[in-house]
């Protein structure tokens, strides 16, 4: 029957995700175990190995943090927020990295507030992820342009970078679990962004040109006071 087929698809999707997670967790664990064994055999403290182990632990931490967003059933804190203010807070949280990488961030926002009914923490997470990806796509001294505007019934936020761009042939894989082109990436960021934006009845799209840059656009419904 149709149901049993769908059930089978769901199970195979779950199986693929589980295999992906197991793989992503096994790598850093194997590496840390190796370094512990070397240090035990040498019977000495090794700063370098500890540094690598710390990075591996951070990687595990980030994987578990991002997967958490799929594990927890909707405990969203919904309220009406001004999207412009959320963006400002998101940018402020990344100020240190922006300064260190000498990246120029330009933020264009409407004068008037852009009200959306949302979970502020989650929407902040989405913007932080998009801005981090933009930063990671650039050498130092790149530029990030963030725009927030109201278009009829929707709020549209774009994050544009002057980074490396995404090759055409990889476009369809962007946002798939664990798809990453980065040495220290986990390939979960955009999947999480997609999930959060879908929960808010919005959508994310991407446009990119190799060597020129990339634009991610997030669309969210504007909150209308019924009263
Ligand atoms: P991660 O950042 O851990 O790799 P993401 O899900 O955030 O995982 O991104 C997946 C992949 O999409 C990245 O590894 C990169 O190849 C590509 N990508 C995302 N954003 C950008 C961007 N702004 N410019 C170029 N490539 C990007
Ligand atoms: Mg990312």
Image (cartoon, helix red, strand yellow):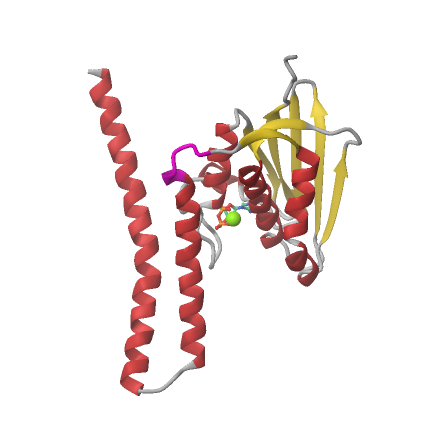
Q: Is residue 83 left or right of residue 119?
A: right
Name the dominant secondary structure of the magenta segment: loop
On screen, residue 176 versus residue 128, left or right, reads: left
Can you say whether 138 is above or below 7 in the image? below
Which quadrant would the N terminus be assigned to in this image? top left
The answer to whether residue 22 is left or right of residue 62 is: left
Residue at screen point 48% across, 33% down: 76
Name the spot of residue 225 as percent of width and height, x first: 65, 17
Figure quadrant of the C terminus: top right
Whether residue 74 appears in magenta in the rendering, the answer is yes
Residue 212 seen in this snapshot: no
Hey, which residue is sitting farthest top in the picture? Answer: 227
Q: Nearer the viewer, residue 208 or 106?
A: 106
Locate residue 53, reporting x and y percent. Answer: 40, 69
Pick out the residue farthest to the front: 227
Task: Tell me: residue 5, above or below residue 91.
Answer: above
Report if residue 191 lies within the magenta region: no
Identify the residue at image location x=30%, y=72%: 34
Instruction: Specify the segment rendered in magenta.
Output: 70-75
Quadrant in which residue 167 is drawn = top right
Q: Nearer the viewer, residue 87 or 219?
A: 87
Q: Position of residue 6 (x, y in %)?
A: 26, 23
Q: Is residue 176 visible?
A: yes
Coordinates of residue 20 in the picture (x, y in percent): 32, 47
Counting every numbered tag in the picture gives 0
State the residue at coordinates (70%, 22%). 151
Q: Residue furthest bottom?
A: 43
């Amino acid at each position: 029957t149709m149901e049993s087929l769908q059930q089978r698809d769901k199970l195979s999707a779950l199986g693929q995700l589980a295999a992906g997670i197991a793989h992503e967790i096994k790598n850093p664990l194997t590496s840390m175990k190796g370094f512990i064994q070397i240090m035990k055999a040498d019977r000495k403290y090794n700063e370098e190995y500890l540094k690598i182990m710390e990075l591996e632990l951070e990687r595990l931490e980030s994987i578990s943090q991002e997967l958490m967003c799929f594990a927890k059933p909707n405990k969203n804190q919904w309220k009406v927020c001004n999207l412009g203010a959320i963006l400002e807070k998101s940018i402020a949280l990344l100020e240190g990295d922006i300064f260190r990488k000498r990246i120029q961030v330009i933020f264009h926002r409407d004068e008037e507030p852009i009200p959306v009914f949302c979970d502020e923490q989650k929407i902040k997470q989405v913007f932080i992820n998009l801005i981090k990806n933009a930063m990671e796509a650039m050498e130092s001294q790149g530029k990030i342009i963030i725009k927030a505007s109201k278009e009829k019934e929707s709020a549209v936020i774009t994050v544009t970078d002057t980074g490396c761009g995404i090759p055409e042939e990889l476009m369809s894989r962007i946002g798939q679990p664990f798809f990453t082109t980065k040495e220290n990436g986990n390939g979960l960021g955009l999947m999480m962004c997609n999930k959060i934006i879908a929960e808010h009845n919005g959508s994310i799209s991407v446009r990119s040109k190799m060597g020129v840059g990339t634009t991610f656009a997030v669309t969210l419904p504007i909150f209308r006071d019924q009263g």
